[in-house]
Image (cartoon, rainbow, N blue to C red):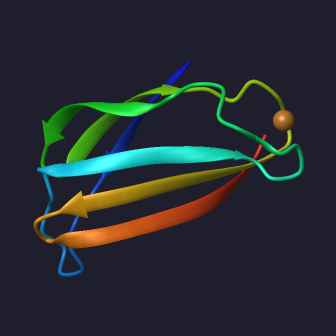
């Protein structure tokens, strides 16, 4: 089980502390999602957010998605992990 620190900032580089973040993901080639429900458990300050519950229970191609809502705006990101 991993803990990730996710850093959020505006396009101009200002740290974003107060935000809701939804974590999603899965393995496109296997048709399944994450085996856990990761979530933000703590705001660490200076734009850093602690995400607990990240788990990758097999090797292969994973896609991880974050959806962010804050007063500064909404954004999302998707990236690949090859494990
Ligand atoms: Cu799989």
Instruction: Identify which residue, 48 or 67, lies in the foreground.
Output: 67
Picture coordinates of residue 23, whole percent (x, y) = 46, 44
**Residue 66 is drawn in which quadrant?**
bottom left
Q: 24 above or below 50?
A: below
Picture coordinates of residue 16, whole percent (x, y) = 15, 59
Would you say 45 lies left or right of 60 here? left
Would you say 44 lies left or right of 32 here? left
Would you say 9 lies left or right of 35 here? left
Quadrant where the image shows the C terminus: top right
Q: 43 above or below 20?
A: above
Q: Quadrant of ligand 1?
A: top right
Instruction: Identify which residue, 83 or 26, lies in the foreground.
Output: 26
**Residue 67 is drawn in which quadrant?**
bottom left
Q: Residue at x 20, y 73 (%)?
A: 73
Would you say 35 lies left or right of 20 here? right
Q: Identify the residue at the far bottom of this view.
A: 12
Picture coordinates of residue 2, whole percent (x, y) = 52, 24
Q: Residue at x 88, y 43 (%)?
A: 30
Q: How many marks?
A: 0
């Amino acid at each position: 089980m991993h803990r990730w620190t996710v850093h959020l900032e505006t396009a101009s580089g200002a740290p974003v502390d107060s935000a809701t973040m939804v974590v999603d993901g899965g393995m496109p080639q296997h048709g399944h999602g994450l085996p856990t429900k990761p979530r933000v458990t703590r705001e660490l300050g200076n734009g850093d957010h602690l995400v607990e519950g990240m788990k990758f229970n097999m090797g292969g191609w994973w896609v991880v998605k974050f959806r962010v809502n804050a007063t500064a705006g909404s954004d999302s990101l998707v990236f690949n992990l090859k494990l």
